[in-house]
Image: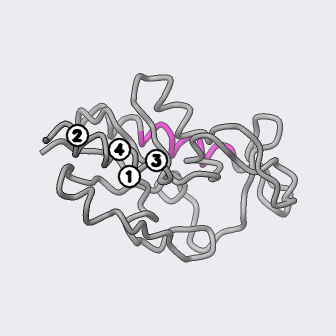
Amino acid sequence: MKKILISACLVGDKVRYDGGHNLSPYINELMNYFELVPFCPEVEGGLKIPRLRSEIRYGRVINEKGKEVTKYFKKGAELALNLCKYLHIDLAILKENSPSCGVHYIYNGFFENHLIKGSGLTSTLLKQNGIRVLSQNEIPLLLEELKKENI
């Protein structure tokens, strides 16, 4: 069965900055088609749970107290890419809006709860290396693609 990388929070792991998760209602259906490889770049990069919220501002990741934490996000992105290469993963499903995993949108960097077009560090690195990256919002479309292929 083909392996895919998936944000750990989407499978119910409590790895969000606030100690919560973002369990996707599509996980069981995805497991009919893929072996899921959960991964949280922020935790793997060395950040704790819970942790301060972070956002990308002018290419740097800053936490809500103004401390730069880019190195943790870069390390997590590199570890995600290494895992994909090692396991021959060419598809990732990541959590939209995250400074690591945002696929199409991230927060604006000023903690104003305002989304802008952009990608998180992990999402960007994976895309640059030829990995197809989808957000959790695109799972229904992926499942439709898979169902059509299996007809």
**What amino acid is found at the position of numbered circle 4 in the picture?**
Leu
Q: Residues within 10 Å of mark 2 (few under 14, many from 20)?
A: few
Mark 2 or mark 1, whichever is nearer to me: 2
Q: Are marks 2 and 1 in contact (CB under 8 Å)?
A: no
Which of the marked residues, 2 or 3, is nearer the chain's N terminus?
3
Q: Residues within 10 Å of mark 3 (few under 14, many from 20)?
A: few
x, y (%) of residue 50? 61, 74
Please, what secondary structure does the residue beneath circle 1 have? strand
Residue at (62%, 42%) from the top-left corner? Answer: 120
Mark 2 or mark 3, whichever is nearer to me: 2
Residue 142 numbered tag: 4
Q: Say which residue label 1 marks.
A: 6
**What amino acid is found at the position of numbered circle 2 in the picture?**
Lys
CA distance for labels 4 and 2: 10 Å
Tell whether 27 sits left or right of 52: left
Please, what secondary structure does the residue beneath circle 2 have? helix
Which of the marked residues, 3 or 1, is nearer the chain's N terminus?
1
Tell whether 101 sits left or right of 108: left
x, y (%) of residue 39? 39, 54
In the rendered image, the quadrant that contains the C terminus is: top left
CA distance for labels 1 and 4: 14 Å
Q: Say which residue label 3 marks.
A: 138
**What amino acid is found at the position of numbered circle 3 in the picture?**
Glu
Mark 3 or mark 1, whichever is nearer to me: 3
Instruction: Using the image as rendered, state which of residue 61 and residue 113 is in the foreground.
Output: 113
* Range covered by the magenta-colored residues: 70-80
Residue at (41%, 71%) from the top-left corner? Answer: 13
Which of the marked residues, 4 or 2, is nearer the chain's N terminus?
4
